[in-house]
Amino acid sequence: MMRILIILLLVCNLFAQEGIEQLIENIQLGKTEDALSALPALERDFPNHPGVMYLAALLETDGDTAREQYQQLYKHHPNSEYSDDAVMKIAEYYYAAGLYIKSSEWTKRMARYYARSEHIDRAVKLFLNALIISGSKDTAFYYSKVFKKQFPKMDVDTKLSQLLNELEITPTEEEPVEVVEENTAKGEGILNKIVETLSSPVPDELELPMPSFPSNKEEVKQPFSLQVGAYGEEANADHQSSQLNAAGFSARVELKESNSRTLYVVKIGYYSDRMMAKVAGQELMSTLGVDNIVISNK
């Protein structure tokens, strides 16, 4: 008897899935009447079905409500066939609202969890565009290198050039910088680590929100920070700072006088106590393999 019930449930789910896909296809063609009529019964019989959740969000006319519905779908069904569509909808919502950093956080999920999605080409362009418009041009340039490694068949350089031309931004010509071999190796290691992280599989459950791109201007100065490097050349310090910011760590460069010599010190974050800074340093080490020490900001 139990086996028969299971078979009946599977058959019902199969027919429901086929029906939902047809309704979604009709909505994309501009035909919403059948979907609007069928939705109440579908929500009653299959309230947690990812297809029903996606269908409801598509039909929702209030933008904020639809965004919340897409987020619930992503959170509870991250491995469903509708999850990548939901993520793109959320990213586009924030972009249209002018919340470019929020938009970039969601398009970054596409590269991290849904690299094989049909939307990935558009997601990469939207991600880079959102960063450039928000003033994070250096982060956009760095992630263009990351995406070139992650998606070797994608013409990332052309996308970036098109975006800059559309926004009438002239890329600054970088001056040649003499970087010691150790720094170059560390930089390549960070880039590879980011690609490895972006290529991770989708977890069964996702916590919202994911880490965003922090801004030093938004941080409240606290007594402690992490020091990750000290350079005699400003360009080397800026190089490491850009890499760390691209990886999601809030890095900055500060001047320090030591024995009649000017050093460019790369620091991360502001922490209220030494233990919090130490925990953050351990996370930095485990994530990117970057050595660091806890220092006082006094």
Image (tube, rainbow, N blue to C red):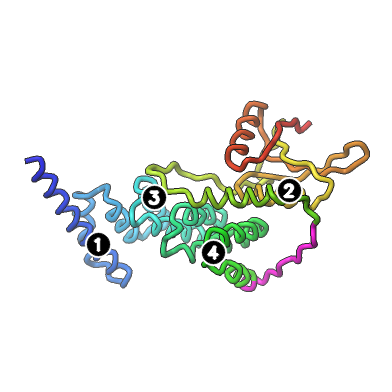
Mark-to-mark CA distance, 1 and 3: 22 Å
The residue lying at 64 percent from left, 57 percent from top is 142
- Give the amino acid type for the residue marked by disc 2 in the picture: Asn
Q: Position of residue 122 (x, y in %)?
A: 49, 66
Kindly identify which residue carries mark 2.
183
Kindly identify which residue carries mark 3.
74
Horizontally, is 230 left or right of 86 in the view? Answer: right
Mark-to-mark CA distance, 2 and 4: 25 Å
Which one is in front in this view, the residue at disc 4 or the one at disc 3? 4
Mark 1 and mark 2 residues within 8 Å of each other at the beta carbon: no
Count of numbered labels shown in the rendering: 4
Q: Position of residue 166 (x, y in %)?
A: 61, 73
Mark-to-mark CA distance, 4 and 3: 27 Å
Q: Is residue 102 above or below residue 223?
A: below
Q: Is residue 90 magenta-colored?
A: no
Kindly identify which residue carries mark 1.
36
Q: Which residues are magenta?
A: 165-177
Which one is in front in this view, the residue at disc 1 or the one at disc 3? 3
Structural crowding at the residue carrying mark 2, measured as other residues with C-alpha within 10 Å and reported as few (<14), some (14–19) or many (≥20): some
- Indicate the secondary structure of the residue bearing disc 3: helix
Kindly identify which residue carries mark 4.
152
Q: Earlier in the sequence, mark 1 or mark 3?
A: 1
Mark 3 and mark 2 residues within 8 Å of each other at the beta carbon: no
